[in-house]
Amino acid sequence: MPQAAPESSPGPQLIAYADRLGGDIAALGALLDGPLSGAFDGVHVLPFYDPFDGADAGFDPRDHAAVDPRLGTWDDVRALSEGRTVMADVIVNHVSVDSARFADVRARGEESPWAGMFLTLSSVFPDGATEADLARIYRPRPGLPFTAMTLGGQRRLVWTTFTADQVDLDVRSAVGWEYLTSVIDALTSAGVRMLRLDAVGYTGKEPGTDCFMTASAHALTERISAYAHARGAQVLVEVHGHYRQQLEIAQHVDLVYDFALPPLVLHALTAADLEPLGRWLEVRPRNCLTVLDTHDGIGVVDVGSSDLVPGVPGLMAPEQIDALVEAIHAGSRGTSRQATGAAASNLDLYQVNCTFYDALARDDRRYLLARLIQLVLPGTPQVYYVGLLAGGNDMDLLADTGVGRDVNRHRYTPDEVDRELTRPVVRAQLAACRLRREHPAFGGQFTSRLNGACAELRWSNGENHVALVLDVRDATFELTATDRTGTDVILTDRSV
């Protein structure tokens, strides 16, 4: 593995769509420099490529190396990166079916110079695929990952892992690699220093495998990492899967997500049970980004068993996961059930679509405790914009689009942002983010003591200490910070 680029700052980062929080890239920067100042060391700007509002909210770019002019320019990205870490997505598995390169392949077939850039069934199985070959392929949705399309006058089965609007790249080809490097060059030239590899686990299609997290996918990750490190950027690998897979991946990459944390915290606060979280704290990787919520749903595959890791149980038992899913639906008053699965044309097999605030029944005290647990644990915390503003499920947006994950992708107006920033639960989260960013204790040693439903999470660095003492049965807690001048109580369950 090549030597990694310098570590990112340990302070919290914001996750946001530029158009759904500030309105565009420059306005997002103004928020970070204005009412959110002092709370975040960085920002993950969700896809701002052309177009940012495609079939998959920007994760299906027509032109991955162009900023959508409705959001700004590369100069705006460069300005945003001044004085803070900017993360952006490298969508390594697919592009939009409407991309110019694929349009040329549709028109000219094998005569197109881009023909080798896209995967068909025969690209991976040149001698044909058996029923066993096809049944083995892992896909996060029901059915097979192929769509029949006409390429140069011939009907072909094009590989479409996620939807028919997103065609998979052949990253083994020279033109596929040239495409990826052009994207990385555009981002790093604009000051982006963290690259999130979206869906990289699905890139390694190999005969005789499940086509997920294969040796080819690992090799591509290492190749991209080496290229990124040479340009001063770190790489974050985005993979949902069994916790043993995350532990293995974390040994070979710069950063991984702690996707197990959200369901474990929800289980603790809905079932008054810290035991699964405690077992995870004993083994979880330190080179992780901690999240409670992201632009996607609340994952459950990350704490469950997996057919891909046979014989190894998950962090939670199946009955605990079932109870958690029902608790989320009950907390959201059934709105998450309307947004999840076939009911919302969203067939992800491993996520419940719901804001974290609604998952906890809009209970400000439990919600703030969840956020404090996240912020106090080791790792780089990322706070999703809807979560920061304690947003509920946007059922109007769901009704407009029919896309389940849109319940957690509200489009805030400037007036809404101003109003939400006055709420005690939002102010308390910002205070906790500023503490996490500024207090020297977080540069020291972390210890945890869990006993039944109670816990103490503590950081110590010389005379500096930060401690979160909590009880998940009634969501009582106290966050204290100590330095040489004495002890301050920062936040308690009475803060909201």
Image (spheres, rainbow, N blue to C red):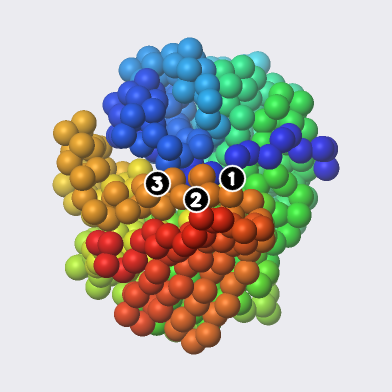
Quarter occupied by the N terminus: top right
Q: Nearer the viewer, mark 2 or mark 1?
A: 2
| Secondary structure found at label 1 | loop
| Secondary structure found at label 2 | helix
- Residue type at mark 1 is Pro
Give the spatial CA distance, label 2 vs label 1: 9 Å
**Coordinates of residue 440 in the picture (x, y in percent):** 58, 49
Q: Residue at x 56, y 66 (%)?
A: 458
**Residue under pointer 3:** 384
In the drawing, does residue 240 fall left or right of residue 228?
left
Q: Residue at x 16, y 33 (%)?
A: 415
Q: Nearer the viewer, mark 3 or mark 2?
A: 2
Q: Nearer the viewer, mark 1 or mark 3?
A: 1
In the drawing, does residue 381 fall left or right of residue 120?
left
The answer to whether one can see residue 329 in this image is yes
Whichever of callouts 3 and 2 sits on the residue coming sooner in the sequence is: 3
Whichever of callouts 1 and 3 sits on the residue coming sooner in the sequence is: 1
Label at residue 462: none
**Residue under pointer 2:** 436
Q: Nearer the viewer, residue 351 or 123?
A: 351
Q: Nearer the viewer, residue 157 or 177?
A: 177
**Residue under pointer 1:** 10
Q: Residues within 10 Å of mark 3 (few under 14, many from 20)?
A: many
Whichever of callouts 2 and 1 sits on the residue coming sooner in the sequence is: 1
- Residue type at mark 2 is Arg
Give the spatial CA distance, label 3 vs label 2: 16 Å
**Coordinates of residue 99 in the picture (x, y in percent):** 48, 22
How many marks do you count on the picture?
3
Q: Residue at x 46, y 28 (%)?
A: 61
